């Protein structure tokens, strides 16, 4: 049925009504979808004062798919009761039934059944009563027949908890005659043409009011997510400082590059399933630089390069395990190894900004995946003072000038420092990153020349973005619950430098 035809039928119904009509009733009378009537109402409202429409909302109860199934077959507990023969049923068999788990619990609560745990064949379920009354099914039948008033609110809410019932809100319009009501639809003119002026026909025409407050049509265009805006600013800072971006397009890493090459022992807590995502297919990596792998094995198990190592039985099986990388330092390790294979060492400055994955407990400030920003500098004679100087330059470009450094421990850096900045809003020092000088046990097995030091630092991308955009919960920034309007409305990121 065309919209114009529906609008005319709506006007005819309104003409014969004394006080007005409800859009839901009109939809039922005309056997059309309610949204078609809503469209007709909007169309008539655009023509002037033909009608008046007041939006109303009402609530009613509806059976869910599982609730409908309960009406037809009985509740889960009733189905469990009926499935038990006079001589009982093994509990293991009962649990295999479609309604077994839920029905068993409810039937036990209702004292319809009992469990004989001392039975020689294992726990066995017996009936405790001869007959039962399936009140759940009866209540749902009453609601289905439209006599929901006979079921009290407490019972309805209990059925709602069991996902057998749902409360549905229905929005409709109560439509009445407007000041210019007519059953004839006359299209309002939107343009005053030269022909109308010449013939004078404009005097009999009805013109649509001009809305001077209306905005133009929004241009279709893409919008950058706040994380991408801040990432672009960080990337620009690194490029201004002469850094080269590392390729970070491999989310999957072997434990060898993610942990072993960084002199992180195989019994370290970070390598546990509670902290790391392990892959099941493919479960292991197969290709490694064999001579380098042997050197890594030796420095872990026996020591070397001035170190006594960890003195444990290093296993290739652990190193082969594939994981979702827990830090982009795994990429830095690959880059430094490739650098060491060149005939002549040349100083380098690398950076990366990409995703890493950790088996974190989700809360307002932690996700299982996030972005890590990492900077690495390799050259002869670099010291802790060089690291602090580079960090001062880097954070000054971010607009952060008040820095403090605190000694820390990392398996692959020595010395290591946590970086703190004074937060003017919170009026306290807060941690903004971690840093250190890569250990000889990590660098020398790669083939990096003696005398070459590598300084590195890292921080997250999400926290600075949350501060810049005033976001308190990280799940409002990243994930499936993000309000995309935030992406459209987000201003250009400008770092205060």
Image (tube, rainbow, N blue to C red):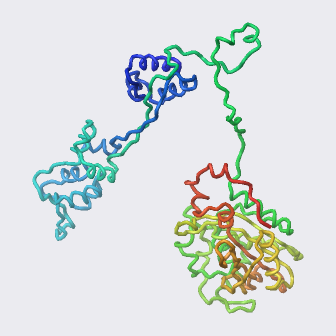
Identify the residue at image location x=84%, y=65%.
239
Image position of 182 (left or right of 218): left
Count the marks: 0
Image coords of residue 342 (percent x, y)? 85, 73
Look at the picture and state if 192 lies above or below 466. Answer: above
Image coords of residue 439 (percent x, y)? 73, 84
Of 325 and 13, nearer the camera is 13
Image coords of residue 110 (percent x, y)? 19, 58
Image position of 349 (left or right of 227): right
Image position of 360 (left or right of 441): left
Residue ranking furthest to the top: 199
Image coords of residue 347 (percent x, y)? 87, 75
Identify the residue at image location x=23%, y=53%.
77
Look at the picture and state if 148 lies above or below 260. Answer: above
Name which quarter of the figure residue 378 lies in.
bottom right
User: Visible in this render: residue 293?
Assistant: no
Residue ranking furthest to the left: 130
Q: Quadrant of the C terminus?
A: bottom right
Of 368 and 151, nearer the camera is 151
Identify the residue at image location x=15%, y=49%.
133
Look at the picture and state if 193 lies above or below 321. Answer: above
């Amino acid at each position: 049925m065309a919209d114009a035809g529906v609008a005319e039928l709506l006007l005819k119904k309104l003409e014969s009504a004394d006080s007005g009509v409800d859009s839901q009733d009109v939809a039922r009378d005309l056997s059309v979808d309610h949204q078609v009537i809503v469209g007709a109402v909007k169309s008539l409202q655009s023509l002037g004062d033909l009608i008046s429409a007041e939006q109303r909302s009402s609530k009613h109860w509806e059976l869910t798919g599982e609730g409908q199934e309960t009406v037809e077959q009985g509740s889960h507990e009733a189905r469990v009761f009926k499935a038990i023969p006079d001589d009982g049923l093994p509990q293991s068999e009962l649990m295999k039934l479609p309604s077994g788990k839920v029905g068993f619990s409810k039937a036990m609560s209702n004292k319809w059944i009992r469990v004989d745990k001392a039975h020689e064949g294992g726990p066995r379920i017996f009936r405790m009563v001869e007959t039962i009354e399936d009140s759940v099914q009866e209540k749902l039948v009453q609601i289905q027949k439209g006599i929901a008033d006979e079921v009290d609110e407490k019972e309805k809410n209990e059925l709602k908890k069991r996902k057998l019932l749902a409360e549905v809100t229905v929005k409709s319009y109560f439509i009445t005659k407007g000041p210019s009501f007519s059953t004839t639809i006359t299209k309002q003119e939107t343009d005053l043409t030269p022909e109308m002026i010449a013939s004078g026909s404009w005097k009999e025409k009805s013109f649509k009011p001009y809305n001077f407050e209306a905005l133009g049509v929004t241009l279709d265009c893409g919008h950058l997510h706040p994380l991408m805006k801040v990432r672009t600013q960080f990337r620009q800072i690194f490029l201004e400082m002469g850094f080269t971006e590392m390729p970070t397009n491999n989310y999957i890493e072997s434990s060898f590059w993610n942990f072993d090459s960084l002199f992180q022992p195989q019994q370290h807590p970070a390598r546990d399933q509670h902290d790391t995502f392990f892959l099941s297919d493919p479960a292991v990596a197969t290709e490694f630089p064999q001579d380098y792998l042997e050197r890594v094995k030796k420095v872990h198990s026996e020591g070397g390069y001035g170190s006594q190592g960890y003195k444990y039985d290093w296993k290739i099986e652990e190193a082969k395990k594939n994981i979702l990388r827990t830090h982009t330092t795994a990429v830095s390790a690959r880059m430094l190894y490739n650098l060491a294979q060149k005939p002549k060492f040349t100083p380098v400055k690398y950076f990366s900004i990409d995703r890493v994955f950790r088996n974190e407990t989700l809360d307002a400030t932690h996700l299982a995946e996030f972005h890590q920003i990492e900077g690495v500098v390799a050259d002869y004679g670099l010291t802790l003072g060089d690291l602090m100087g580079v960090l001062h330059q880097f954070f000054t470009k971010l607009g952060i000038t008040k820095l403090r450094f605190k000694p820390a421990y990392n398996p692959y850096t020595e010395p290591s420092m946590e970086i703190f900045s004074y937060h003017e809003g919170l009026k306290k020092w807060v941690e903004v990153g971690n840093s250190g000088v890569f250990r000889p046990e990590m660098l020398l097995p790669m083939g990096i020349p003696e005398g070459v030091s590598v300084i590195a630092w890292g921080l997250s991308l999400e926290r600075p973005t949350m501060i810049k955009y005033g976001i308190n919960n990280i799940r409002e920034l990243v994930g499936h619950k993000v309000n995309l309007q935030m992406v459209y409305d987000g201003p250009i990121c400008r770092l205060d430098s």
